[in-house]
Image (cartoon, rainbow, N blue to C red):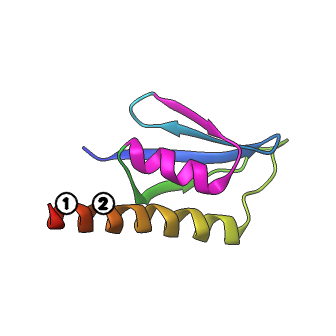
Amino acid sequence: MAITASVSLFKNEFVAELSDGRHIERHDWREMAEALFGAGVQANAVEYVWRAGQRMITAGQQVAMRSEIRRQALRNEGQSIAA
């Protein structure tokens, strides 16, 4: 079963709750994307959540994070093919 992530922005920190119970916090969207990829989360398995009292993750940040996860996956795929 694929691991999913719910990502929110709380006090300038990206916070992800993974479906397997893990919790990831990162300051930068790129660092969060790398951490999510490392945890086995695919770009299409990320949900962006907003709750009262939290800042919204902008559309640009959402696109950038998904793109970075996809880039990591393609780079990893390319490395495994070359090996």
Image coords of residue 18 (percent x, y) = 47, 37
Q: Which residue lies furthest to the front in this view?
A: 83
Badge 2: residue crowd in 10 Å (few <14, some 14–19, many ≥20): few
Seen at 49% across and 51% down, the residue is: 34
Taking 14 as reference, is 73 above or below it? below
Residue tagged 2: 76
Magenta-highlighted residues: 22-39
Query: What amino acid is at disc 2?
Result: Asn
Q: From what the image shows, is residue 32 above or below residue 44?
A: above
Q: How crowded is mark 1: few (under 14 residues within 10 Å), some or many (20 or more)?
A: few
At 25% across and 63% down in the image, what residue appears? 79
Is disc 2 in contact with disc 1, using a CB cutoff of under 8 Å? yes
Horizontal placement of 32 versus 45: left or right?
right
Q: In screen coordinates, is 36 left or right of 8?
A: left
Q: Quadrant of the C terminus?
A: bottom left
Magenta stretch: residue 64 in it? Answer: no
Callout 1, which amino acid? Ser
Q: Nearer the viewer, residue 59 or 50?
A: 59
Residue 38 at x, y percent in the picture:
40, 45
Kindly identify which residue carries mark 1.
80
